[in-house]
Image (cartoon, grey):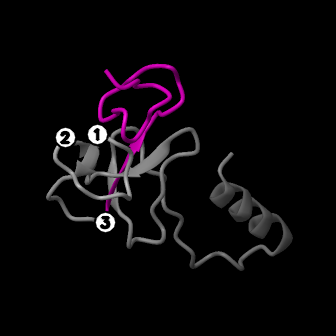
Amino acid sequence: MSARRCLALVVAVLAPGLGAGCQTTACTTLGGEYSAHDRSAACCDDLTNYNLMVVPADTYEGDDLPEGCGVEAVPDDIMVCIECGDGVCGEAEHFCNCPDDCPRE
């Protein structure tokens, strides 16, 4: 159960009516994107979020990313939800955002 659902359940049981005006937000599912500026957005519990602008790139000169990784010209606040850690290099995963599932070739 997600933290949001647990909190909503606690409020409903301990203080009925207190959360009546609150709106709960569903989590972002696999492959879904959201803005990092949206404080109510998050990946579902079994997923990992990463910034879409970090990609494999041979020409990146910065020191802030692993070797062979770089940035792409997309808005820097777009996050995507992936299944990193499941042993499968899935869609939208690569060695820059999920080295456990996607070894460098």
* Left or right of residue 28: residue 105: left
Residue 44 or 61: which is nearer the viewer? 61
Could you tell me which quadrant the N terminus lies in? top right
* Alpha-carbon span between mark 2 and mark 3: 23 Å
The residue indicated by pointer 3 is 77
Q: Residue at x 20, y 42 (%)?
A: 57
Q: Could you tell which of marks 2 and 3 lies nearer the N-terminus? A: 2
* Left or right of residue 64: residue 53: left
> In the image, what residue type sits under mark 3?
Asp
Q: Residues within 10 Å of mark 2 (few under 14, many from 20)?
A: few
The residue indicated by pointer 2 is 58
Q: Residue at x 48, y 50 (%)?
A: 43
> In the image, what residue type sits under mark 2?
Asp
| First to last magenta residue range | 78-105
Residue 69 or 54: which is nearer the viewer? 69
Could you tell me which quadrant the C terminus lies in? top left
Which secondary structure is most common in the magenta stretch? loop
Q: Is residue 31 above or below residue 3?
A: above
